[in-house]
Amino acid sequence: MPEPANRTLQRGLSILELLSEHPDGLELHDIASVLALPKSSSHNLMQTLLAARYVRLTPAGRYQLTLKTFEVGAAVVQHTDVTQVLRQYMQQAFAECNETMHCGVLSGREVLYIDKIESTQSIRMASHVGIRMPLHATAMGKAFLAEMTDDEVRALYAEQPPHALTCRTITHVDELLAQLHDIRERGWAMEDQENADNVSCVGVAIADRDGRPAYALSISAPSFRMTEESAEACATLLLRAKRRIQRVLRAL
């Protein structure tokens, strides 16, 4: 019996999304493994995508997206603004974590919160769009700071050092720089009860088409839910959203 059309379509779209994250292409067994698909189903789906010219098969046996996917996407990009892009990928990440999400922009020594998706769980973070928070005490802010050089960070706090919001807030620039070094290495930032007691956040910075950090996304949760494992899971969601947003922004 053939699979229901909606399930087949969903699998085909998942393949296109997966290949979009691997410009050099993937072999059939990689696609089947990542998406947990039977190899026979993967083969049939790839043959359909090949016939429709959405993918090509390289001489090395790897499947890659073709320019046809760009043609389809370009029609959408022409009528898309940045806020729509950010909100779309925020919603995708939120659907997998159901924790409060924020989007912010850099504003001097602060992050200005410009969008929010609130968790439906009974215990959640209290915040609102339009609030400003210090860079050194937030995950989004640290993600922005990590995009700066150490000298730029020192200059930012030369006249007024970081101030404490809680007993956990980093208030020494050298300690902050050490943490920023770790953030640059792993690609995402975290703050643990540094901005508000009993709240922890994970964040990433988003570059615009010129490569400058223009936006940041974060996932916030009560600290008892933000375990090391859940923080890494949230970081994975944010890094995926970051890659996808930056690809779209480069095309706008």
Image (cartoon, rainbow, N blue to C red):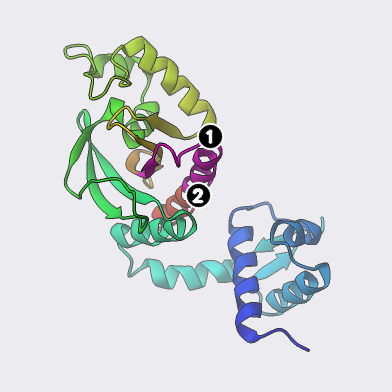
Label 2 sits on a secondary structure element that is helix
128 with respect to 85 (left or right): left
Q: Which residue is labeled 2 in the image?
A: 237
Q: In this rendering, is residue 164 above or below 74?
A: above
Point out residue 215 in the picture as x, y percentages from the top left corner.
32, 44
Magenta region: which residues?
A: 217-240
Left/right placement of residue 244 relative to residue 142 reads: right
Q: Residue at x 38, y 33 (%)?
A: 143
Q: Is residue 78 left or right of residue 47?
A: left
In depth, the one of 66 and 231 nearer the eye is: 231
Q: Quadrant of the N terminus?
A: bottom right
In the rendered structure, which amino acid carries the disc numbered 2? Leu
Looking at the image, is 9 positioned above or below residue 137? below
Could you tell me which residue is drawn at 79 percent across and 71 percent down?
43
Amino acid identity at mark 1: Glu
x and y, in percent, of residue 174 in the image: 36, 10
Q: Which residue is mark 1?
A: 228
Characterize the local packing of mark 2: few (<14), some (14-19) or many (20 or more) Cα atoms within 10 angstroms: some
| Relative depth, front residue between 78 and 2 | 2
**Is label 1 in a helix, a strand or a loop?**
helix
Tell me the mark number nearer the camera, choosing from 2 and 1. Answer: 1
